[in-house]
Image (cartoon, coloured by chain):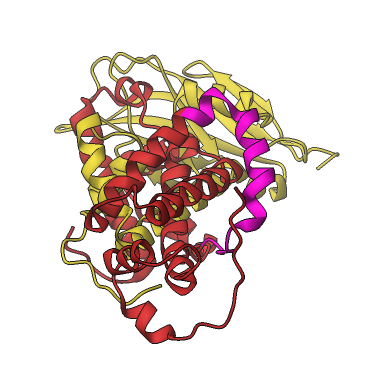
Chain colours: A red, B yellow
Amino acid sequence: MVYSFVMEPRAQPATVERANDAELARRIRASPPGGARDAEAELYRRLAPRVRLYGLRHLRDEQAAADLTQQVLLITLEGLRSGRLREPEKLASFVLGTCRLVVLDLHRSAQRHRRLLEEFAHALPAAEPPRSQPVDEEKLAECLERLAERERSVVVMTFYDERTSEDLTSFLGVSAANLRVIRHRALKRLRECMTGERSGS
Amino acid sequence: MNEFRCANPLAADVLADYWLAALPPAGEEPVEEHLLGCDECGSRLRQLIALGEGIRKLARSGNLRVILSESFLNCAASEGLRVRQYSLPAGGSVDCTVTSEDNLLIGRLAVNLASARRVDLCFWDAAGTELQRLRDVPINPAGREVIFSEPIEFMRAAPATVVVVKLVSVEETGERVLGQYRFNHTPSPAS
């Protein structure tokens, strides 16, 4: 089956944009196939960056996260159209379950999914993943300088390979809980220094 | 981005733990479910990712003066960074330089840290003036050296110079020098 999307001007953009996720899901579910294109496009636009974050966290790779996003949203929209997703209020649970399965599947059969994507990718609406502004490096270097030595070492070594590490606890001679406290205090100070605001958490 | 505000934002430390895979497995599910329904917290997570990306970029640039671990250096070398290291015993002296091909400039100071609680890393010039002091550097009392990264661009641009580095134990009764190390820097012809 090939899913065809034609990106047309939205008939009621305000209505679609103001609907929450569950309302969009309900609208897609209640419509005949292809009858709720606006809702599908809006839901895709919202879910794509969220699924991409999940993909980045679990796959640590931009392209793999993009592949995951397309596959998960394909399955989600199909689940809504076919009525398989019975409770639109549980959309996030359904998407999370799908993310997990697809990640497992991606690990198992990367090749098969590449073929699937080649076949269906053109049929999905486009959604540019939102990206945060890159940080001001000069300011970040200045803020890192202001951290206590221990905090600077912890954030540099933590984010260098984006993993918490047993090496860090043995390097510092502290427990994992203490390391966590040092890391959070350092990140809080960095955020405050970068934004010029004091935060509560 | 839609207009819905998050009624129950995830705490910053939870987002950081999530990104760093430091949450217990049972703690991940509610966070992920929340993120799949919430653009506001997703945006905060993206900011954290961008911050981490910036830190990594700075670390790779070699322009931070920071205390590092042996396994960090191994990781950097395995990623293809060229790490120039100078290892000195306490009281030692070394002729050193840095080239345009180097990515990280590292000093490795052998020291007995067994009795130390707070250690400062101090940089002196040859005339005996303290130039900079890194206070309370991270140490493991069981460790036998302190590894630090020196800002590489600064050293590439530096003229021939002598830097004396001291590891100082700060105690209630005063300061005790644990080790003194002399770096005789000359610019590389290739730099």
Residue A118, how many percent across, how many down? 69, 44
Name the residue at the right extreme.
Answer: B189
Name the residue at the front extreme.
Answer: A32
Residue pictured at 53% horizontal, 62% vertical = A134
Q: Is residue B119 visible?
A: yes
Residue pictured at 31% horizontal, 46% vertical = A94
- Per the rendered image, the range of residues in magenta is A105-129
Q: Is residue A3 left or right of residue A36?
A: right
The one nearer the camera, B138 or B116, is B138
Q: Quadrant of residue B122?
A: top left
Residue pictured at 43% horizontal, 36% vertical = A58
The one nearer the camera, A132 or B128, is A132
Q: Quadrant of residue A176?
A: top left
Q: Is residue A171 above or below residue A122?
A: above
The one nearer the camera, A96 or B52, is A96
Q: Is residue B145 left or right of residue A180?
A: right
The one nearer the camera, B44 or A171, is B44
Q: Is residue A149 visible?
A: no
Callout count:
0
Q: Is residue A134 left or right of residue B115?
A: right
Q: Is residue A133 left or right of residue B43?
A: right
Q: Is residue B178 magenta?
A: no
Residue B36, how many percent across, how many down? 33, 53
Q: Is residue A23 above or below residue A183?
A: below
Task: Provide the major secondary structure of the magenta segment.
Answer: helix
- In the rendered image, the quadrant that contains the C terminus of chain A is bottom left
Q: Is residue A127 magenta?
A: yes
Residue A124, how many percent across, how many down? 58, 58
